[in-house]
Image (tube, grey):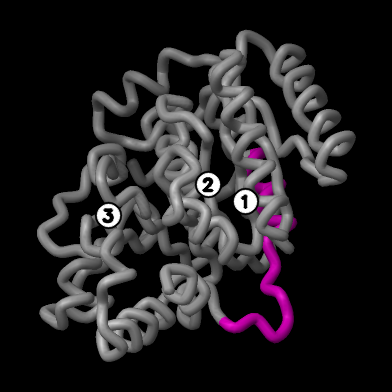
Amino acid sequence: MRNEALHLRQMMEACRRPANVLAITSGKGGVGKSNISANLAVCLAAARKKVVLFDADMSLGNLDVIMNVSSKYNISHVLNGQKSIEEITHIGPEGLEMICGASGLERLADINEFQRQRLTQELSKLQSQSDAIIIDTAAGISRSVVGFCLASDHVLVVTTPEATAITDAYAMIKVLVGNRFGGRISLVVNMAESIATGKRICRQIGGVAKRFLNADVDCAGVLVRDERLRRAVSMRKPVVLAYPRSQITSSIVALAAKLSDGLAARPNDEGFFRKVVDWFF
């Protein structure tokens, strides 16, 4: 494990940049969003960034499985005052910090002002104490998903070559633009048959977004379908650590480097988690 981590750190060392908040989302489930979130977080942590990985899927979160973390406490325990944010934070591979999902955050619209202030205060600690926050949202365009995305500096929309996934990815981009998202929107094509196929899909979605939404959507990368991803999940281990010298790991490292380069804090930002909480009122 030590040699694997060292190899990964060496691959990422040359591309260290300051980073802020990246939301990873998709219009459709089953496109590999959580796998990408987990592995990007490990890559950034391997580059000696202080990374927080936040599972914002409050009904079907599965990052604990991918990262082999046993979660007893979560955000709901912070909301009701039982635990602090530090007490529910788990340490994952490469020292990254991880917060597992919980149903409590879906009830933000029902919390009182004291609970709202407590939640904002506790969550804001994460942003002030970290270099990068990666938000793994739920799939779809629900209010909570949109809220996390709009509060972020950068949104990575994950799709696959399937027609339904492409349609839903464009729908997500349309919602972000319609809500006047001021950050950067990028696209990654997962499970592609080839790099060429993935790039073609990126160009198609980007072209349509530019023509009909006047939005710039850049292609962050293409991940070719790889059976080792499925095997790594069975091992409850991020693929970049399970297969550090594979092509899929090299592709994810390149993706992490590109995203890290574009993740910079916006001046006079009111705070990511404050904006998330405010979105529900």
Residue 238: horizontal and vertical position, in percent?
Answer: 37, 37
Verify CB contact (< 8 Å) between mark 1 and mark 2: yes
Q: Earlier in the sequence, mark 1 or mark 2?
A: 2
Crowding near pointer 3: few (<14 within 10 Å), some, many (20+)? Answer: many
Q: Residue tagged by mark 2?
A: 24
Q: Earlier in the sequence, mark 1 or mark 3?
A: 3
Residue stretch rendered in magenta on the structure: 254-270
Verify CB contact (< 8 Å) between mark 1 and mark 3: no
Is residue 268 magenta-colored? Answer: yes
On residue 155, which mark appears?
1
Q: Please identify the quarter of the rendering in which residue 162 is found.
A: top right
Q: Earlier in the sequence, mark 3 or mark 2?
A: 2
Numbered disc 3: secondary structure:
loop
Residue 96: horizontal and vertical position, in percent?
Answer: 39, 60
Amino acid carrying label 3: it is: Gly
Q: Nearer the viewer, residue 109 or 59?
A: 109
Amino acid carrying label 2: it is: Ile
Q: Residue tagged by mark 3?
A: 101
Measured Cα–Cα span from mark 1 to mark 2: 6 Å
Q: Nearer the viewer, residue 237 or 271?
A: 271
Numbered disc 1: secondary structure:
strand
Is residue 119 magenta-colored? Answer: no
Tell whether 210 sits left or right of 91.
right
Q: Please identify the quarter of the rendering in which residue 182 is found.
A: bottom right
Q: Quadrant of the N terminus?
A: top left
